[in-house]
Structure formats: structure tokens, C-alpha cells
Image: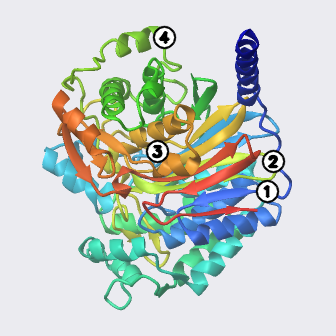
């Protein structure tokens, strides 16, 4: 009997040692034959793959995918938009952020937007007055110059070919063209671009973008400067003047991309690196995970009523915190807004959560419009570099305005500012509006373990936190972590919105506690569209996953 006990004890000790070694095992250098790409569209994935196969790195491939998505997903991103990317430089073993978020014009008179709340919504939702200075071209150029190995023309050649030859219309594009027909019809150039035969294109039909190909040729020949100081800039200013837009030549020539530090926070044995403001999601995700780290989540079944209640109550605290740090302003690009979060703050916040009571959300302030539709790209190259790129025009098809002859669709990022005047996230000359984009790395032993991001507005905060918890706490594979049912606390109407696959017992438990519950589709893109890469420590290789809630294509070699 004693021998059996000793044998069992030895097994336990050995298991603990193996687990310790497993957790602390280094992520080895990626095999020279391997690169991984996850994008929301097969054309973007294939062109990124082509760049990698020709010796380009993750940043080269990421920029190629950015421009490709501008061609094939004009509803989510484009040269008239902006975004945020984070990059891991394997040689320097460091992460950086490139902030190419759109900015309000420098000479803007914000009072014209705040005559009434109706004025704000009307003026910022669509049309020429909703357009901020685009940052995508400058961001792509900064990424290539700082971290890339290829030239603009090398990266753009396959994109030009795709735009000239055409592409098969996706189901998403076809549906959105139908849904936004009246919206796009209001602008002559947009209507001619998207409805050449006066009708939305069906899934599988070929769409050609010859004018856009010419725009890319200009960029390939003359570089990004042509967009901000050359021929394209002149056309933008001319069209703005003709249509009472607000962007002038100095807005374009003085636009600056910002190279920043990532915001970092420990979580269990990992470190999370994500985007600082103007991202309103990155810091919130860190806050949420640090609060939940105080609890033994594994004692609750995944998506049980107890787990969802705890998560939702933590979300309420996070949205309260977010209300405060956004109110403190987003102009200072060097601040981390109190992060890493102090243990004192987390302990105080977690004590406000009652496992059996529903807390009110009266301290949550609606700070800004948060539509933030967009697209995301995750790439790791054969050199060990990684990039996570989140892009947006804000609303689907942005402002609905297309630049004549150049096929550039503009953003409506003005709508992301606060609805209220005279606060630190109100419309102001040169200010970048907050946005819920959160390209993120989960680092293990200072290497990218998870490369992730997506679209979905502020629901992305909840979704990315759930996926990270699914992987770290519940040990799910990447496929399982992303496909797992999602939920979100909608503080506008005090309701937990969730995919209908969540167990009925969980729903009834939440209702008994006093939560309101609203069911969505079983797999609903409302909760975000995710692209991610995850390192598998057993196989010593990366898993790759696109959200089944929308088209998404991966590549590995």
C-alpha cells in the first residue's frame, strides 16, 4: 500500500515538473519554410502568401493584404480610411505600434457639429462633413519604411493586377451592396463605382476596379507622398472645396503617423501587448482580464450561468473605467492611462462584484459612437516577425463618398467622436477619435504566442477577452476558442446579448439573478469577426483560424 502511494506521489511530482517545463518551454524560431496568414478574404490571403514566398516579411505581406482588402472589401477598409497595427520585430525582440488613425481637419470649427444632437448625427454619419484626414496610405508607408524589406511597387504589383482583372464578389459584399444601395446612391461617384449596371452585383459575379488600379499605379510609381502632397492630394482638396468638405491641403501635408509603444499587462504566465489610445478597446481588454484574473474561473464550466454572470459584472466595472480614461482625453500619445493596472485598483474593483447579485451600471457613461466596422490581418513570417493589423472606414462604406476618377472611398470617422461638445473626446482640430480596434499579441517567453484582432465595435472588448480566457483558462484549441458561443453586456439597454447556442440552463440561471437576456443567431458576426494565429506547444507549430461567422481565409506553408 505504501509503495502504491509513493508511486502515485512520484507520478504527481513528475506531472507537475512536466507541466512546469511545458509552460516555460521557449517558442522556437519558425522553420524557414513556414509562414502563416489569416485575413478575411482569400484574395488578401493569397497576395500576402505571394509576398512571403518572394522573401518578404510579415510587414510586407501585411501591407499587401491591407491594399488587397481595399480592393475586395470596400465596405470595411480602404485608402480613405485608417487603422492601427502592432508589430513584433524578432531581431530586436520588441513590439511597436503604428497609429495611422484618421484625424480631424486642422482648421475645423467644431461648433457646427454641436448645434444639436441631431446635427451631430446628421453631419458625422455620412457625406463630406463626416470625413477625417485618411491615414491608411501613410500608415502602410511607415510600416514598410520602418519594418519592411520590399518597395511599394513590389508590394502593389499583385494588387494592381487583381484590381485590373477583377475578382469574384463575396457573399458579404453582395449583401452589403444591396443593404446600402440607397446610402451609396446619394453620391454619384459611389453609385457609378458599385452599381455600373444600376443593380448590386451578385455573389460570384466579377467586379473590376480599373480606376483603382490606376490609383495604385500612381502609388507604386511615386510613393505615398502623392496621396498627401501630390496629384491625389490636389484632387481631394478640389473635391472638398466643391462639396463644402473641410479637408484642405495642409491637413494632408501635415498628417503624421505615430510610432508608439504597445500597452503591456501581465496575465497569468503571459504578457499581453496591445494598442494604446486612440484605441478604446486595448486598455479595456487589459482591465477586464486583470479583474477576472482574481477569480478561479476554471471552477465554473465554460459559458455556465455563474461564469457569464462574473464576466458581465466585470464588464460593467471595465466600462466604468473606460468612461473615465476616455474622458481624461486621448491626445497624449505617450500615456498608458494608468496601465499596467495597479493591484490596489483591481482588488478594489473585484470586491464590487457579488456572485449572486446584479449590479447597476449607473456609473457607465456613453462616451462616443462606437460603430467601428472593419477588417483584421494576422501574419507571422518565416523570420519570426509578426504583425496584427486592424483597419476601418468606421461605418460600412464609411462616408459613402468616393473620390472622382480615383475610386477612393472615404471614412466617416468624425462619427466616432463624442456626441457632447467641450469634452476631451469631442471634435477638435487635429484630434484622432477613439475607436474599438485592438490588434493584440499574447506573449509567452517574450515571443508571440497568440496574434489576434478583429472587427466588431466595442463588442470586440468582450470577444477578445473571452477568446483569450478560452485559451489560457479553459485550454481550448484556437478553433474551439473562436467558435465557442459568445456573449456581450450591452450597457445601453442593460441586457446580456448572446448567441443562441448557449445552454438554456445558463440562460435561466442568469434570469433568476435578475439579468435581462437577448438571444442572437447561433453564429452571429454581430459579436465580431476574428483572425488569429496561435502557437501549439505540443506540435511546435502555429494553428490558424478565421471566424466562421464571416468569410475568412488562412494560409500556412
Which of marks 1 and 3 precedes in the sequence?
A: 1
CA–CA distance in space, label 1 to label 4? 40 Å
Instruction: Mark 3 or mark 2: name the one nearer the start of the chain.
Output: 2
Choose the circle earlier in sequence order: 2 or 4.
2
Image coordinates of residue 455 in percent, x first then y, are 44, 52
Question: Horizontally, is 218 left or right of 397 in the view?
Answer: right
Write down the residue under mark 4.
343
As drawn, 376 above or below 4: below
CA gap, disc 1 to disc 2?
Answer: 7 Å
Res 490 visible:
yes
Indicate the secondary structure of the residue bearing disc 2: loop
Q: Mark on residue 437?
A: 3
User: Residue 30 has which mark?
Assistant: 2
| Residue situated in front as seen by the camera: 321 or 155 | 321
Counting from the top left corner in percent of width and height, residue 507 is at 24, 40
Q: CA distance from mark 3 to mark 1?
A: 28 Å
User: Which of the two discs, 4 and 3, labels the residue nearer the N terminus?
Assistant: 4
What is the spatial separation of the Cα atoms under label 3 and label 2, in whole angstroms? 28 Å
- Tell me where residue 259 appears, x and y as whole percent: 62, 38
Q: Residues within 10 Å of mark 4 (few under 14, many from 20)?
A: few
Residue plotted at (67% across, 63% down):
555
**Circle 1 residue:** 34
Amino acid at each position: 500500500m505504501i509503495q502504491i502511494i509513493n508511486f502515485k506521489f512520484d507520478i504527481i511530482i513528475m506531472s507537475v515538473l512536466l507541466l512546469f517545463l511545458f509552460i516555460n518551454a521557449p517558442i522556437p524560431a519558425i522553420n524557414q519554410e513556414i509562414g502563416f496568414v489569416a485575413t478575411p478574404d482569400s484574395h488578401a490571403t493569397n497576395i500576402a502568401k505571394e509576398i512571403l514566398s518572394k522573401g518578404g516579411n510579415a510587414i510586407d505581406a501585411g501591407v499587401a493584404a491591407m491594399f488587397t482588402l481595399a480592393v475586395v472589401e470596400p465596405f470595411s477598409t480602404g485608402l480613405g480610411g485608417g487603422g492601427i497595427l502592432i508589430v513584433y520585430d524578432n531581431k530586436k525582440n520588441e513590439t511597436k505600434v503604428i497609429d495611422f488613425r484618421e484625424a480631424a481637419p486642422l482648421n475645423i470649427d467644431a461648433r457646427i457639429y454641436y448645434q444639436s444632437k441631431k446635427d451631430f448625427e446628421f453631419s458625422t454619419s455620412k457625406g463630406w462633413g463626416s470625413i477625417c484626414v485618411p491615414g491608411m496610405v501613410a500608415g502602410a508607408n511607415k510600416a514598410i519604411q520602418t519594418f519592411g524589406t520590399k518597395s511599394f511597387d513590389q508590394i502593389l504589383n499583385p494588387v494592381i493586377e487583381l484590381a485590373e482583372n477583377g475578382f469574384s464578389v463575396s457573399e458579404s459584399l453582395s449583401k452589403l451592396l444591396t443593404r446600402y444601395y440607397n446610402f451609396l446612391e446619394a453620391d454619384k461617384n459611389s453609385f457609378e463605382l458599385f452599381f455600373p449596371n444600376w443593380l448590386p452585383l451578385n455573389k460570384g459575379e466579377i467586379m473590376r476596379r480599373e480606376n483603382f488600379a490606376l490609383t495604385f499605379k500612381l502609388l507604386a510609381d511615386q510613393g505615398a507622398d502623392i496621396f498627401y502632397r501630390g496629384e491625389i492630394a490636389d484632387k481631394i482638396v478640389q473635391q472638398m472645396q466643391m462639396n463644402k468638405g473641410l479637408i484642405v491641403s495642409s491637413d494632408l501635408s501635415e498628417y503624421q503617423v505615430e510610432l508608439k509603444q504597445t500597452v503591456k499587462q501581465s496575465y497569468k504566465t503571459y504578457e499581453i501587448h496591445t494598442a494604446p489610445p486612440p484605441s478604446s478597446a486595448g486598455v479595456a481588454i487589459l482591465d477586464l482580464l486583470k479583474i477576472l484574473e482574481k477569480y478561479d474561473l476554471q471552477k465554473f464550466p465554460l459559458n455556465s450561468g455563474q461564469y457569464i454572470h462574473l464576466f458581465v459584472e466585470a464588464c460593467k466595472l471595465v466600462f466604468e473605467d473606460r468612461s473615465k480614461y476616455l474622458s481624461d482625453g486621448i491626445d497624449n500619445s505617450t500615456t498608458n492611462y494608468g496601465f499596467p493596472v495597479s493591484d490596489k485598483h483591481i482588488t478594489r474593483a473585484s470586491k464590487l462584484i457579488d456572485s449572486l447579485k446584479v449590479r447597476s451600471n449607473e456609473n457607465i457613461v456613453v462616451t462616443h459612437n462606437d460603430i467601428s466596422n472593419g477588417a483584421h490581418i494576422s501574419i507571422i513570417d518565416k523570420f519570426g516577425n509578426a504583425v496584427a493589423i486592424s483597419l476601418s472606414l468606421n461605418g460600412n462604406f464609411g462616408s459613402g463618398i468616393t473620390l472622382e476618377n480615383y475610386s477612393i472611398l472615404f471614412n466617416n470617422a468624425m462619427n466616432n467622436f463624442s456626441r457632447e461638445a467641450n469634452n476631451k473626446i469631442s471634435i477638435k482640430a487635429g484630434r484622432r477619435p477613439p475607436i474599438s480596434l485592438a490588434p493584440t499579441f499574447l506573449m509567452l517567453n517574450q515571443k508571440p504566442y497568440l496574434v489576434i484582432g478583429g472587427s466588431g465595435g466595442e463588442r470586440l472588448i468582450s470577444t477578445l477577452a473571452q477568446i483569450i480566457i478560452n485559451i489560457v483558462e479553459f485550454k481550448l484549441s484556437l478553433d474551439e476558442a473562436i467558435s465557442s458561443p459568445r456573449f456581450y453586456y450591452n450597457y445601453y439597454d442593460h441586457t446580456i446579448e448572446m448567441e443562441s447556442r448557449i445552454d438554456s440552463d445558463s440562460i435561466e440561471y442568469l434570469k433568476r439573478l435578475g439579468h435581462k437576456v437577448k438571444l442572437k443567431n447561433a453564429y452571429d458576426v454581430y459579436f465580431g469577426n476574428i483572425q488569429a494565429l496561435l502557437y501549439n506547444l505540443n506540435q511546435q507549430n502555429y494553428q490558424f483560424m478565421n471566424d466562421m461567422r464571416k468569410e475568412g481565409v488562412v494560409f500556412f506553408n
